[in-house]
Image (cartoon, rainbow, N blue to C red):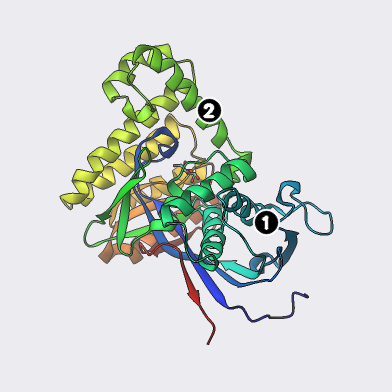
Amino acid sequence: MALAETPTYQYLAHAPGRVNLLGEHVDYNGGQVLPAAIDRHVDLLFSPRTDRLMHIHARDMEQEAFFSLDTLEDRLCLDGTPLPGWALYPAGVAQALTLADLHLTGLDCSFTSDIPMGSGLSSSAAVELSFAAAWNYLAGDPFDRTRLAVLCQQAENQYVGVNCGIMDQFSIANGQEGYALLLDTGTLQFRTVPLPPDTAIVIADSGERRSLNHSGYNERRAGCEQALAILSCQLPGIRTLSDVSPAQIDSLITELPAPIGDYAKHVVYECDRVRQAVGLLEAKNAVGFGQLMLECHRSLRDLYKVSTPALDTLMELATQAPGSLGARLTGAGFGGCTVNLVREAEVEAFIRQVKTGYLAATGKEAAIFPCHASQGVRVTSIIP
Ligand code: GLA
């Protein structure tokens, strides 16, 4: 099929991105996280085929991939060329669903996205969930949302090769309009948490792009596992770093070699910040919550070392801007976006000032936009 042809599709899978408000780099350490699905989406149009072939049109990139569900292990297109990087996500999801005994049909499909790629807003997890939800829908919805999230995480860990936690896939699956999710990544239990009244979430995109598999993400995770192994000798009851208290890490930090002592300290204190945040949000204390966001950024910068000069600039500019309550890098780091909590009445002035400041400091434009907490992935029939 030529790209110029516009086939008619039967269904639409609509999968949001996510922004994480607090609890960074704790989802693979058993801690609690506070993400929200956002009103930026992957839209996947699809129709089932009668065979096991996949024909995917990635509209934003004007690329297509044609591959078979019977040869996923090969990671090759039908013409023998390697699958393009973006096609690893649907192919990985197909493999994870197949291993979970879902029978898949081939798809004719086409997707587009307004989630900036590689920006810490989980554009890849949104692609994963859109395909997972599509196949689940066609099979009569045997898997619940949490199971879909876990299978997509497996796809990313095992097929794409990024050792990510569950937060992104989970929030894209289970997002709730108007709320953040408080997710316990140890048990996968969650509940909704209201956002502070009269505040807005504003995202500021540094324009720097990162790829998780080319970054230090897997290295940070391995460092945390090493720290847990060492700390377990002194604290035999712990199962994850989220079981360690700030007082315990402070007294045992000298047992841990650099840089993993700093990594573990970030994780332990970040878990504690989320515990404090829950009470503050319930008490509608936006100022207190904003302070925790600032502490989180400093810890990601100084201890976990995943910030960049551009993200630090955005965070510093935000603290001086009108209406600012809190600012921090969001997602894995190494580039991407900051998330800001801003008084609703001052959002426009905030955006104006940070944009101007960023241009003056870096010579680059930052895309800065408010976002709203939204529903998780859904599939609708678009047959008239
Ligand atoms: C990425 C990963 C998540 C999480 C964050 C950091 O978004 O996909 O699992 O680890 O980084 O909090």
- Under mark 1, the amino acid is Ala
- Under mark 2, the amino acid is Ala
Residue 352 visible to the viewer? no
Residue occupying image coordinates x 34% and y 22%: 238
In the image, residue 101 above or below residue 270: below
Q: Position of residue 112 (x, y in %)?
A: 59, 68
Q: Position of residue 158 (x, y in %)?
A: 61, 41
Q: Confirm or deny contact between disc 2 and disc 1 (CB under 8 A).
A: no
Residue 80 visible to the viewer? yes
Q: Which mark is residue 159?
A: none
Q: Nearer the viewer, residue 130 or 248?
A: 130
Residue denoted by label 1:
87
Q: Position of residue 141 (x, y in %)?
A: 47, 63
Residue denoted by label 2:
222
How many C-alpha atoms fall within 10 Å of the one at disc 1: few (<14), some, or many (≥20)? many
Circle 1 sits in a helix, a strand or a loop, which is it?
Answer: helix
How many C-alpha atoms fall within 10 Å of the one at disc 2: few (<14), some, or many (≥20)? some
Q: Nearer the viewer, residue 134 or 16?
A: 134
Residue occupying image coordinates x 55% and y 49%: 100
Residue occupying image coordinates x 63% and y 50%: 95
Q: Nearer the viewer, residue 324 or 268?
A: 268
Q: Position of residue 96 (x, y in %)?
A: 58, 49
Location of residue 179 (image quadrant): bottom left
Residue at the right extreme, as displayed: 79
Circle 2 sits in a helix, a strand or a loop, which is it?
Answer: helix
Residue at the left extreme, as displayed: 283
What's the distance in space between the residues labelled 2 and 1, CA to CA? 27 Å
Q: Nearer the viewer, residue 7 or 365?
A: 7
Location of residue 106 (image quadrant): bottom right
Residue 279 left/right relative to 80: left
Quarter that holds the N terminus: bottom right
In the image, residue 242 above or below residue 314: above
